[in-house]
Image (cartoon, rainbow, N blue to C red):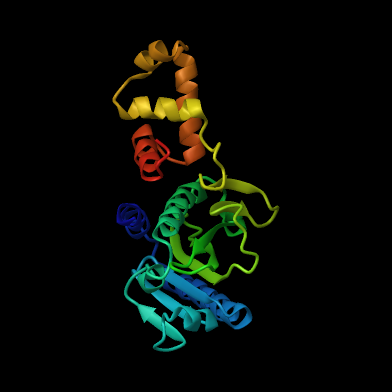
């Protein structure tokens, strides 16, 4: 889990942030108001992470009391973008899936027009360790109009009242309800058997020509599969795809 978290941590914190103090403060204040309203309405936990300064603001509703986390005061400031105190209460595998999905979301958000960024979010179902209950997590990235860098991340947590086992996580468009991507736990056919087979061969160091000969298919077909894998996983190259697929135990 720490490997994926480290990957995501590096992506988020090493961006070239655009310095505009007035806009930064305005966006931060707006998100803080959203977080406060959320915990008052949903009794949940809201974590607003400021990526430029590597710190978070934790807004703790009644869910925090149930989980026995963030008990010092209603609003806390922590010197990290990770709510480790909460993660320690959750199933480690679910937290891993959450981080992977956020990494894919980070890569995806930079490929769409800035004005659409606010329409997308990550939704994850996280089981509470040693407990029959689960919580739902929804995360939004807030970006800078000048360079599309992600400046703030807002995580919202509340109990999963429906106790749905249909999915562990997805990237969704909240404006039209479309699902952009689901985790493997919720979509076993995310990568086809052939794509997984080719990914294993790539990981073993085989080139497209060798793969084509071994599978009795054309090089063009192999290359098409490779491109499909990159597009599905929202990664830049097959090395990243192999790394992520291994951590997810797809290959």
Q: Nearer the viewer, residue 249 or 222?
A: 249
- Height in image: 172 above or below 133? above
- Height in image: 182 above or below 115? above
Label total for image: 0
Residue 20 x, y percent position in the rendering: 42, 68
Q: Quadrant of residue 197?
A: top left
Q: Is residue 42 left or right of residue 124?
A: right
Q: Residue at x 49, y 51 (%)?
A: 105
Q: Residue at x 47, y 57 (%)?
A: 146
Give the residue at the far right of this rendering: 176
- Height in image: 234 above or below 130? above
Q: Residue at x 59, y 77 (%)?
A: 38
Q: Residue at x 59, y 60 (%)?
A: 118
Quarter of the image where the N terminus is located = bottom left
- Height in image: 188 above or below 161? above
Q: Is residue 217 visible?
A: yes
Residue 185 x, y percent position in the rendering: 52, 47
Residue 245 x, y percent position in the rendering: 40, 40
């Amino acid at each position: 889990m720490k490997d994926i978290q480290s990957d995501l941590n590096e992506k988020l914190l090493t961006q070239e942030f655009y310095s505009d103090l007035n806009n930064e403060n305005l966006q931060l204040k707006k998100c803080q108001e959203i977080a406060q309203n959320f915990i008052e309405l949903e009794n949940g936990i809201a974590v607003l992470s400021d990526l430029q300064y590597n710190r978070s603001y934790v807004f703790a509703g009644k869910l925090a009391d149930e989980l026995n986390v963030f008990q010092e005061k209603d609003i806390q400031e922590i010197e990290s973008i990770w709510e480790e105190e909460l993660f320690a209460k959750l199933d480690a595998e679910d937290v891993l899936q959450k981080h992977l999905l956020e990494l894919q979301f980070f890569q995806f958000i930079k490929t769409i027009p800035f004005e659409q960024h606010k329409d997308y979010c990550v939704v994850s179902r996280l089981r509470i360790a040693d407990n029959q209950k689960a919580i739902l997590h929804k995360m939004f990235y807030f970006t800078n109009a000048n360079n599309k860098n992600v400046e703030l991340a807002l995580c919202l947590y509340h109990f999963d009242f429906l106790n749905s086992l249909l999915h562990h996580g997805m990237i969704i468009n909240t404006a039209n309800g479309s699902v952009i991507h689901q985790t493997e736990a919720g979509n076993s056919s995310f990568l086809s058997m052939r794509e997984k087979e080719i990914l294993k061969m790539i990981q073993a160091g085989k080139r497209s020509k060798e793969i084509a000969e071994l599978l009795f298919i054309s090089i063009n077909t192999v290359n098409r599969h490779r491109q499909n894998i990159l597009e599905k996983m929202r990664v830049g190259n097959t090395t990243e795809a192999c790394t992520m697929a291994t951590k997810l135990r797809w290959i």
